[in-house]
Amino acid sequence: MNVRYKTLKYSLAGFLAILAAGLCQASEHPQNTLEQSNLKKALYCMDILENRPDLEPSHRIDILRNECFSETYIQHSPHVADGRDAVLSLFAKRFKNSPNITTSVKRTASEGDLVWIHQHVKRTPEDLGRSVINIFRMKDGKFAEHWNLGQAVPEKSKNNNTMF
């Protein structure tokens, strides 16, 4: 009887531990949902920004202004002026001057309100392109702040790995 009681006691303790672990994970679920939502929205916005030449440039800018960029957008890239209007102006010019630019997403990550997108950007189909990493802080489903870095894809590499 004593062995049965101990077995039942330990089984119940194990069950409660598993239940508690599940509850802890469930409490983390809202953050995971926010991260997934931010990543999904960032990818949608990057697609409009980079890969939708089928849309009229003015329509793309309207979508980006209304759905993707916060009114208080902060820019950290030194070659782009601060603010939403500045970045939208830059892309309006790019849509006109570089209509063949394409971007392919290679990997993504999100944590809290931050989203990382690693991309291969090509100005023309023949271009080797650039490896670009964009980091966005999201707020209310929009780009609120931006950092990025990039480097040209070389013709030859000192290793057999790709940049992607």
Image (cartoon, grey):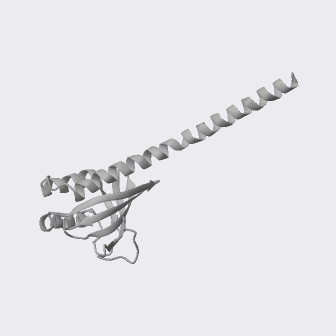
Image coordinates of residue 135 in percent, x first then y, are 38, 62
* Relative to 73, 85 lies left or right: left
Task: Identify the residue at the far right of this view.
Answer: 2
> Quarter of the image containing the C terminus?
bottom left
Q: In this rendered view, identify the residue nearer to me: 116 or 100.
A: 100
Q: Residue at x 22, y 61 (%)?
A: 102
Q: In this rendered view, identify the residue nearer to me: 101 or 28.
A: 101
> Quarter of the image containing the N terminus?
top right
Judge whether 115 appears above or below 3 on screen.
below
Q: Is residue 140 visible?
A: no
Report which quarter residue 18 is drawn in: top right
Report which quarter residue 161 is drawn in: bottom left
Judge whether 104 appears above or below 5 on screen.
below
Q: Residue at x 32, y 77 (%)?
A: 156
Q: In this rendered view, identify the residue nearer to me: 58 or 19.
A: 19
Image coordinates of residue 151 in percent, x first then y, are 33, 74
Task: Identify the residue at the far front of this view.
Answer: 160
Q: Residue at x 38, y 53 (%)?
A: 139
Image coordinates of residue 76 in percent, x first then y, are 36, 70
Judge whether 87 appears above or below 31 on screen.
below
Q: Residue at x 33, y 68 (%)?
A: 131
Judge whether 147 appears above or below 17 on screen.
below
* Relative to 32, 143 lies left or right: left
Q: In this rendered view, identify the residue nearer to me: 87 or 10.
A: 10
* Relative to 32, 164 lies left or right: left
* Relative to 154, 56 lies left or right: left
Q: Is residue 104 visible?
A: yes
Image coordinates of residue 82 in percent, x first then y, are 30, 69
How many tags in the picture?
Answer: 0
